Each structure stands twice: as structure tokens, then as C-alpha cells.
Amino acid sequence: MTLAIGHFLTVWTILALNIMTPGPNVLNTITTAMGSGRAAGLGSALGVGLGIGLWCLGMALGMAALFSLFPMARTVLTVVAVAILCGFALRYLRQSLAGFRDRRLGLPPGREGMSVASGFWRSLSVNALNPKALTTWLAILTIFPVARAHAGDIAILCAGACLLSLAIHSAYALAFSTRVAARAYLRAAPAINGLVAIFFLAFAAKLLAGLAR
């Protein structure tokens, strides 16, 4: 590893916050665990971990090649990243306000009869088709200095992203395999979304300040 640990921690923090907020991957893991049990839920968590690791690897290699050919692309994509982060913040803020207005959040039906393997493959496909993944990694890897990263740095970044997402979704599968726990999580969702919105706005402001300098 040649890059400072702070670069990795920044990426992993943003990723963790995005993973923890309710979205297609989270709801898929929760409903799989509710309907088919913890084993299938853990299979779903494994699919998310692998999927996010592959997203990280593909986007990191693509960004590294882009910045190598066009150094000015970093400035342009930093502006794009600010817009994406502000878009995320606005979406999470709207979800937060909607959640506080209407506390009667229902649970989607549990996915019954799924094995560990089917939970894994379904989760992998949900992750691959999730448009949030593309914009998330575009924003994150504009922040991470991929142009200066060595192969070892990218390997550490991707392995950390994979393990982090696997750990969080495994916790979902274990904790939210009952409807009582899932309802408690959804009740807390408005507060979670609000805090994540504030974080993304603050980080967007930090990026803008860096451009101004």
C-alpha cells in the first residue's frame, strides 16, 4: 500500500453509509432472510459483497485509465461527484421527511423458498442492475486518487469494500430475519436517511472548497 490510510477510510465511510440506508440491496437481503431464513439471507449478503467488490474493481480500473489519458478529467468528474452527492442528499432528505410524516411503513413480502445459492444469485443480479451502484462508485472514485494508486492499493480498496458490504448485509440477515426486527429498522429509517443526507451535503461542500482552492 502506497497511499495514506485516510484515502481508504474516506471511501469506506461513504460506502458504509450508502450501504446502511434502505435501498434495493438492503430490502432484498431483509426480505430474503424474513421469508427463507438466515442461511438464504447470508447467501444474499455474500452476493452483495461480491457484487460491490466487482463494481469497485471495474470502476477503479476504468477511472485509472481515464485519468491517465486525460488528467483534466478529474476536475470535471469532481464537479460531477458534487452533483451526485447533492442528489443523494436530496433524495435521502426527501425519504427522511416522508418517513417522519408517515410512520406506517409496511414491509414488502418475504421471499420464501430460497436456498443459499438462489439468495446469492438473486442478490448478485439485483446489485448488477442497481443504478445507484454506478453513480455511487462514480462519486467515490472521483474522490479516491486512483491515478496514483498501485495495484496493491486498488486490491486493498476493493477487498475492503467487499468485506464491508458483506459484514453489513450479514448483520442485516442475522438481525432482521424476523418481522419485528425489520419493522424496528424501518421505523429508524427516517432518522438514518436524515443523518446520511447531512453527511453527503457536508462532503459535497468539502469537495467544492477543494476546487475553489
Image (spheres, grey):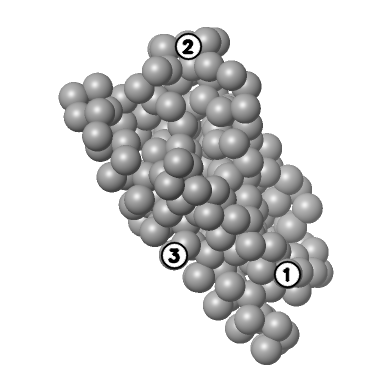
32 and 146: which one is in front?
146
Q: Nearer the viewer's eye, disc 3 or disc 2?
A: 3
The answer to which image quadrant residue 177 occupies is bottom right
121 up-or-down from 54: above or below:
below
Per the image, the residue denoted by label 1 is 191
Residue at (55%, 36%) from the top-left corner?
Answer: 11
Query: From the viewer's perspective, is the residue at label 3 or at label 1 nearer?
Result: 3
Residue lying farthest to the front in this orientation: 213
Q: Amino acid at mark 1?
A: Ala
Q: Classify the position of the C terminus by image quarter.
A: top left
Q: In terms of sequence position, does the residue under pointer 3 or pointer 2 come before the other?
A: 3
Residue 100 is left or right of residue 87, and the answer is right
Q: Which residue is mark 2?
A: 152
One can see residue 42 in this view:
no
How far is the residue under mark 3 from the one under mark 1? 18 Å
Which amino acid lies under the numbered mark 2 shown in the image of this protein? Gly
Residue occupying the point 68% across, 89% down? 101
**Residue linked to disc 3:** 87
| Circle 2: element type | helix
Res 71 seen here = yes
**Quarter where residue 31 is shown:** bottom right
Question: Of callouts 3 and 1, which one flags the residue occurring earlier in the amino acid sequence?
Answer: 3
- Which residue sits furthest left? 69
Horizontal and vertical percent position of residue 5: 62, 22
Q: CA distance from mark 3 to mark 2?
A: 32 Å
Crowding at mark 3 (Cα within 10 Å: few <14, some 14-19, many 20+) = some
